[in-house]
Image (cartoon, grey):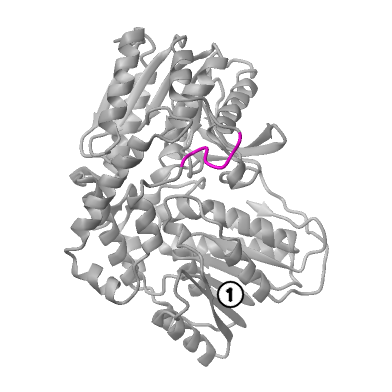
Amino acid sequence: MLHRPAGPVHGSVVLVGPFAEEKKAAQRALVEAARAWAAAGWDVLRLDLSGTGDSAGEHGAATLGQWRADLRLAVQFQRERYPDLPLTLVGLRLGGLLAGLEAGLAEQLVLWEPVTSGAAYLRQCRQRSTLRKELTGGDEPAAGAAPDDGFDFDGFAVSGELSAELAASDLGTASWAGGRRLQVVQIGGSARPKKPFAELVEHAQAAGLEATLTTVAVEAFWASIGLVDTSAVAQATLDWLQPGPPGLVAPADLAPAAEVAPGVRATVYDQWSGEQRLRGVVYEPAAGGASRLLLLLHGWSGYRVGPGQLLTTTARAAAAAGMLAVSCDFRGRGESEWQVGEASLNSMIRDASRLLATFLDRPGLQRATLLGLCSGSEVALGAALGEPRVDSLALWSAPIFSGNFDWQRRARRSRAMLGGYLRKLGRRETWAKLLGGRLNWRLILRAVGGGRSAEDSGVADKAPDTATQMREFETFAGRLLFIYGGQDPETAPSREFYRNFVERCGMPHRFVEVAGANHNFYSTAWQREVLGTTLEWLRQPQETL
């Protein structure tokens, strides 16, 4: 994604995000930072590394060498457009490690809460994966392990080669040749400099760089459950950047479409929804001929790629199976326009309805399926009623529809998270963080408080209440597939609610439980089961009770 200034350009930026689910949580923050810098005269290129996000390739085949080559290619693109202006590399978390390893490519280097030791980061990844299983009570499927001594990190296959490359990477021994200025940004509640960051700045200064450590009191948004205001982080970097002489915006030769998998063509897409633009990606068979639309609807605080790239993987598999799959960001999320706080469940329902109306006008598309994950399932229930050509809904981890927050639902999450944190108190590393003042109390309190705030909190445009919505949904004439994780605390009450509803209304339906899985199916094996079950169900249009 390229964010271009409207007026004079003072320099170019290449922005690389973090790893795995940290990227999903940080996506909106990176988008908003890029927009703010572009408004101030910086031409910003954001990229998904090979095998991540919307980019082609498999995550399990990704290597650190390939990701560094991706970064060099992005820098070359910006250099060719602005050869006489300063170039800045900005990296968050693991993206910071990558940027640091390629420090010589840029005049200015910005590292947001960077991973300084790849080996330490790998240990933390494994610990977080173990903790996540403990919080849900689930066990990682044996089939989820990556080959060649790699591992499955919450649905992301990490190869043995990538693991070995990361373990050998350390910014403390990196070369800073060619670099001029460095800003290390420490993000969190403490103003006391972290030892690895202070040492990193000293190392850079010894190499002759103008190096600065900046602390910003903002929640660790790459690990946050909800959406966080990160404008202070973007502003701290904007204040530090040294602009070059103003120039003109350079043209960019970008292809809007590409074949991202065998037989699958992806096209960047946008359209109006009200007064704002929706943005996303359309996947279709390269040979054409799709007759069914699959509209993928992400969760409340996520974006179109989904947890563990599950929605992107599904969209590509659906296109390979002959469908046209549309994966867009709702307004106020991901790449789409609008402010985060303006979005509501109701606005998301309208976004989905407008996408349906647009794509079902295409020649050849006769029927549509809505596929929703978590809150996206609530959106599917609301959007399905306005279009008779929607004949099926695939609902993953569907909560009980509630335009106003369900306090019982929040209590269930609170109990589950509290139990997990109590188990964690038995760990030595937990007490080390506690005594060292390194626990994120804000995040812990939010998790124990129920995980996330009300979907429609603070907005006037609220969705209908549960009784009203489900009464209207009784008229739906299509099929329903419900998939839940066996260790998701919301599974039992939600499944009971929907089972009673569909049986009372006589709706064709199927319920599937993925044994051991959590809410977002954080395992490659669980994701394969979810995807395989959904595609098989779509191929059986006459399936009934």
Q: Is residue 131 above or below residue 368?
A: below
Q: Is residue 45 visible?
A: no
Q: Amino acid at mark 1?
A: Leu
> In the image, is residue 457 part of the stretch drawn in magenta?
yes
Question: Where is residue 477 drawn, in percent x and y?
Answer: 45, 9
Q: Nearer the viewer, residue 179 or 216?
A: 216
User: What is the total number of numbered labels drawn onto the structure image?
Assistant: 1
Q: Residue at x 51, y 23 (%)?
A: 382
For the C terminus, the image quarter is top left
Question: Where is residue 42 drawn, in percent x and y?
Answer: 72, 64
> In the image, is residue 296 part of the stretch drawn in magenta?
no
Q: Nearer the viewer, residue 385 or 209?
A: 385
* Disc 1, SS: strand
Q: Nearer the viewer, residue 354 or 120?
A: 354
Residue at far left of view:
426
Q: Is residue 495 above or below residue 67?
A: above
Question: Where is residue 152 drawn, in percent x and y?
Answer: 28, 51
Q: Residue at x 51, y 47 (%)?
A: 55
- Which quadrant holds residue 389? top right
Magenta residues span 454-460
Q: Which residue is mark 1?
A: 109
Q: Nearer the viewer, residue 124 or 146?
A: 124
Q: Is residue 180 left or right of residue 449?
A: right
Majority secondary structure in the magenta region: loop
Q: Residue at x 37, y 37 (%)?
A: 407
Q: Is residue 149 left or right of residue 532?
A: left
- Which quadrant holds residue 123? bottom left
Question: Where is residue 53 drawn, in percent x and y?
Answer: 49, 48
Label 1 crowding class (10 Å Cα cut-off): few <14, some 14-19, many 20+? many
Q: Is residue 60 visible?
A: yes
Q: Is residue 234 above or below residue 323?
A: below
